[in-house]
Image: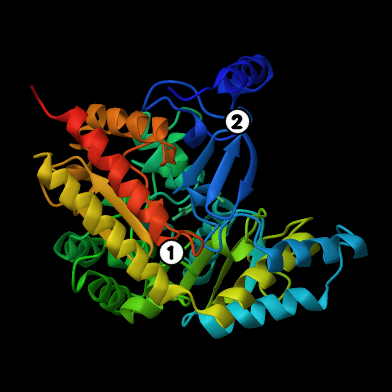
Amino acid sequence: MLECSKSRSAFARACRVIPGGVNSPARAFGAVGGEPLFIQRGEGQFLVDIDGNRLIDYVGSWGPHILGHGHSSVTTAIQQALARGTSFGAPTEAETELAEMIAEAVPSVEKVRMVNSGTEATMSAVRLARGFTGRDVIIKFAGCYHGHVDSLLVEAGSGALTHGVPSSPGVPQGCTADTLSLRFNDAGQLADTLRSRGDEIAAVILEPVVGNMGCVPPQPGFLEACRELCTQHGALLIFDEVMTGFRVAYGGAQSRYGVTPDLTTLGKIVGGGLPVGAYGGRADVMDSISPVGPVYQAGTLSGNPLATASGLATLRTLKESNPYDALEVATTRLVQGLSKAAMNADIPHQMTQVGSMFTLFFNPEPVVNYDVSSRNDTARFAKYFQGMLERGIYLPCSQFEANFVSACHTPADVDNTIAAAAEVFATLVDR
Ligand SMILES: *Cc1c(COP(=O)(O)O)cnc(C)c1O
């Protein structure tokens, strides 16, 4: 057993003043049982908890740490920015540099606005799409998570899915009345919906590679169909690349799959571990935002100097070192090893992978949408999660999450992870 007495008491203390002891529900171990570990520090591919356990980390703060924890170029950039001041409420040149880097990297982005979280990015993109088109209805796909935006909390993935609350109390009926939730990877259903209600639809928003019902790649032709149908019906196509941006390729899923949306939302990696989001796209659409256009959106700390420095250093390092091929090779070796170990133990499963994102689903059917993903064997996942944790492997504490490999993970880490999984799978076999 993992020694965790200090985490236990830290959690008890936290629970007295923080709801559930955590500042975001994805951190609670509700879906797998037990209590969260409290982290003391991150070092490259490792997390060290307050009991001194050193764990191989496949969460990476839920996506941002593609370079691993505490990359020297990022921490140095933050320290240098800190010495100059934490916030000015006036423009800085670094914000323009970051915007230029994003526009250069992400095919759809001509102009970009920085915000402070992925949620803020999707909320703003939806408002912009409605303001620009003069239409109200948004189409989303079940199992895609776009942050805790009122109008998008309809059959959301990840936290809401795990905790069995498809829509949250506190979201008035009116907020979701203009949101339609369709099946991911079902271009026919999207075509039918647009055929009947096309002139009401402001935007279609999706995770081009879903991360928030586990990693679910788009089937061939699906993204292309979304693009074509949106163009045909005058709706904007929004790719929520908060997770996939700078992850599945430097230019995100849109560069990997060669499909260009009208608007893109970013977060996670673009902040390098600091609270950052961004939304960008076609210049004519983006110029509808105030102060140029009438659609209001603002932020006291948007483009914050520390966050901007962190994001800039992360993107520069990614651009210069181009770790994407190596990440994909390492991840492929890991998922093949895990699959083989699961097969050897006769564990029904599906493995999905795009670049350095992957999910091992305890499910015999190919996971192509939320209907299938909701049939995952979550009890078996909980045992797998706990078994891996005992062996020093820190996985996302839900079956409905993507795992992330960082540029710091070594072949030895991959081998150790596969060996741990083989041991755990042997304990999962039905007797
Ligand atoms: C994480 C995530 C969000 C929300 O970002 P926050 O920074 O947590 O608000 C939105 N969309 C996707 C696809 C995400 O993965």
The answer to whether residue 328 is left or right of residue 42 is left
Q: Please identify the residue farthest to the right as the structure is shown.
A: 84
Q: Position of residue 194 (x, y in %)?
A: 24, 65
For mark 2, give the secondary structure: loop
Q: Is residue 128 above or below residue 358?
A: below
Amino acid type at mark 1:
Thr
Which of discs 2 and 1 lies nearer the camera? The answer is 2
Residue occupying the point 45% across, 51% down: 146
Q: Position of residue 381 (x, y in %)?
A: 27, 33
Q: Position of residue 154 (x, y in %)?
A: 37, 42
The answer to whether residue 392 of the structure is visible from this angle is yes
Residue occupying the point 63% across, 77% down: 316
Identify residue for label 2: 38
Mark 1 residue's CB less than 8 Å from ligand 1: yes
Q: Quadrant of the C terminus?
A: top left
The answer to whether residue 252 is left or right of residue 426 is right
For mark 1, give the secondary structure: loop
Quarter assignment of residue 37? top right
Q: CA distance from mark 2 to mark 1?
A: 27 Å
Picture colour scheme: rainbow
Residue occupying the point 51% across, 51% down: 60
Quarter assignment of residue 306? bottom right
The answer to whether residue 390 is left or right of residue 288 is left
Q: Nearer the viewer, residue 201 or 280?
A: 280
Amino acid type at mark 2:
Phe
The answer to whether residue 184 of the structure is visible from this angle is no
User: Which of pointers 2 and 1 lies earlier in the amino acid sequence?
Assistant: 2
Question: How many numbered circles are shown?
Answer: 2
The answer to whether residue 338 is left or right of residue 61 is left
Q: Position of residue 222 (x, y in %)?
A: 22, 69
Identify residue for label 1: 244
